[in-house]
Amino acid sequence: MEFEKNKKIEILEQFVGGRYIDEDTMTLLSDNLECINETVYRGMPFPKHLIKKGYIVEEWHGSSHWSLDFNVSREVFSQDKFNISEDYCEALAEEMKMSYDEVYDNIFVPVVFKLNGVSLGIRLYNLVKDLDLVSRFYKEKEITTIGINTKIKNFEIKTDSYGEYYLIEVEELF
């Protein structure tokens, strides 16, 4: 389905702002799926106890957001505790019989997931650029995936100027 330019802008603004996915969003994104052969990275705080070989990392809200730029994933997103889902943190607190604050402050560690290519992804930065949207998403070289889960192949603890983090190699599950 082809959307007019203003409708594309509206759909993308809703998606990049709040990660809102409705039928129009799915149509627009699905029309732009392609094989991504480059390595992609996803930085985020992640529960330390779940970092183990073979663990399946599921998408949390129907989509995942990666970058072609390791530094963006490491410097910005791996340390951004504001990106931790409150619902997920509350569920972990209940499961682990801890307070929300204990889970939030002590369970999550900075990680960078590394995925060597994606079978189907959306070069969100190209959609944003093509529609003349001024957005950090272009600078971040964001790759969006929908419905893709991954499995931890291996990991290592690294240290850089920001401190300790986990570099986690994952593979796509089909």
Image (cartoon, rainbow, N blue to C red):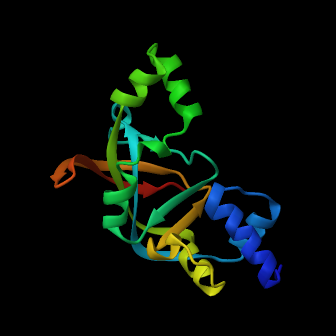
Q: Using residue 125 as the reference point, say whether residue 105 is left or right of it.
A: left
Q: Say how many tags the image has.
A: 0
Q: Position of residue 33 (x, y in %)?
A: 63, 74
Q: Using residue 143 as the reference point, say whether residue 72 is left or right of it.
A: left
From the viewer's side, name the closer residue of 11 and 91.
Answer: 11
Above or below, 70 against 173 in this view is below
Q: Which residue is most to the top? A: 97
Please identify the quadrant where the C terminus is shown: bottom right
Above or below, 100 against 8 in this view is above
* Residue sitting at x 50%, y 76%: 138
Above or below, 96 against 22 in this view is above
Q: Using residue 122 as the reference point, say whether residue 11 is left or right of it.
A: right
Q: Is residue 123 visible?
A: no
Q: Position of residue 69 (x, y in %)?
A: 36, 70
The quadrant holding residue 54 is top left
From the viewer's side, name the closer residue of 97 and 99.
Answer: 99
Q: Is residue 101 visible?
A: yes
Q: Position of residue 52 (x, y in %)?
A: 33, 38
Q: Which residue is most to the front? A: 134
Q: Position of residue 172 (x, y in %)?
A: 47, 58
* Residue sitting at x 82%, y 83%: 4
* Residue sitting at x 33%, y 48%: 111
Please identify the quadrant where the N terminus is shown: bottom right
Above or below, 49 against 16 in this view is above
* Residue sitting at x 31%, y 66%: 71
The quadrant holding residue 98 is top left
